[in-house]
Amino acid sequence: MAELFIKQAASYAATRPGYPPELFRFIASKTPHHDLAWDVGTGNGQAAVPLASFYKDVVATDTSPTQLAHAQRLPNIRYQQTPESVTLDELTRLVAPMCSVDLVTVAQAMHWFDLPTFYQQVKHVLKRPGGVLAAWCYTEPCVSDTVDAVFWRLYKNSAPYWAPARKIVDDEYRSIEFPFEVVDGEEHTGPFTFKATKHMDLETYLAYIRSWSSYQTAHEQGIELLPEEVVKDFESAWGGNEVKPVQYPVHLRIGRVM
């Protein structure tokens, strides 16, 4: 699965939505201090860059050097490639010392992780008490009734080609194991819902679909999920190639260590 993301690094950077400012304001309001944040599975840095406005320093890690090559550089972000399996000693050396991190974030990636191992790492680096883990995913885009009707027919056809972990995203992270305490001011650990908006023309929207891991899996099996007749359906529903706002629901789980 990681190989698919590496192949699609440029497409991910160009077609994936950014995240809304209110998401980061909400998260930052839940950490007592704003010295260091660790963005795990940063990809092209879509979460690391806005985090850098709230935290003095950000360390952003990914296993893919190809993804990191597309990341935006800022003075207070340190991008670090990590192996797929990291010991606690390596975590201290490559990422941050024990009990030194105010916030750990994971954007659209935690459903791929070995959660028991990851949670051990999170609890190792987070400050106690009060260090926060914030993990979010986004679900499928909304454009208009006509475009969305074509989209959902396509999405149903893509189901056999998604990895099993995709079901966790479709469930909006509701069922994911999340052994953390409620953050101050909230009654539960989520999901809390926000909306991300990306302005796209039809060509970019179709490029987003082609960046799916399921699209790549189907393609490698000789299946074209966007045949000419489906593209024509999208063209008719879109009504030209003008730029439209495409909204993605974002679902956040957030909790703190004691």
Image (cartoon, rainbow, N blue to C red):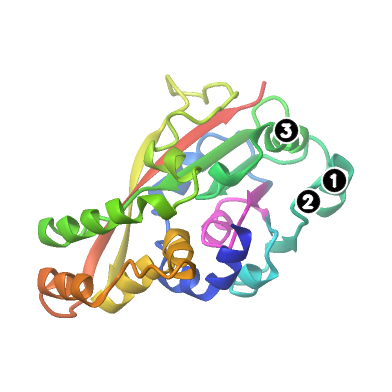
What kind of residue is marked 1?
Thr
The residue where tag 3 is placed is 127
Of tags 1 and 3, which is closer to the observer?
Answer: 1
Could you tell whether 11 is left or right of 4 in the image? left
* Marks 2,1: beta carbons within 8 A: yes
Image height of 163 relative to 121, above or below: below
Could you tell whether 132 is left or right of 200 in the image? right
What kind of residue is marked 3?
Lys
The residue where tag 1 is placed is 92
Please tell me which residue is depicted at 44% across the width and 74% down the height of the picture: 14
**Residue 95 circle label:** 2
Image height of 12 relative to 179, above or below: below
Start and end of the magenta stretch? Answer: 37-58
Could you tell me which secondary element the residue under label 1 belongs to?
Answer: helix
The image shows residue 58 at horizontal and vertical percentages of: 67, 55
Of tags 2 and 3, which is closer to the observer?
Answer: 2
Please tell me which residue is depicted at 80% across the width and 47% down the height of the picture: 86
The image shows residue 20 at horizontal and vertical percentages of: 39, 54
Q: Residues within 10 Å of mark 3 (few under 14, many from 20)?
A: many
The quadrant in which the C terminus is found is top right
CA separation, marks 1 and 3? Answer: 14 Å
Please tell me which residue is depicted at 22% across the width and 74% down the height of the picture: 231
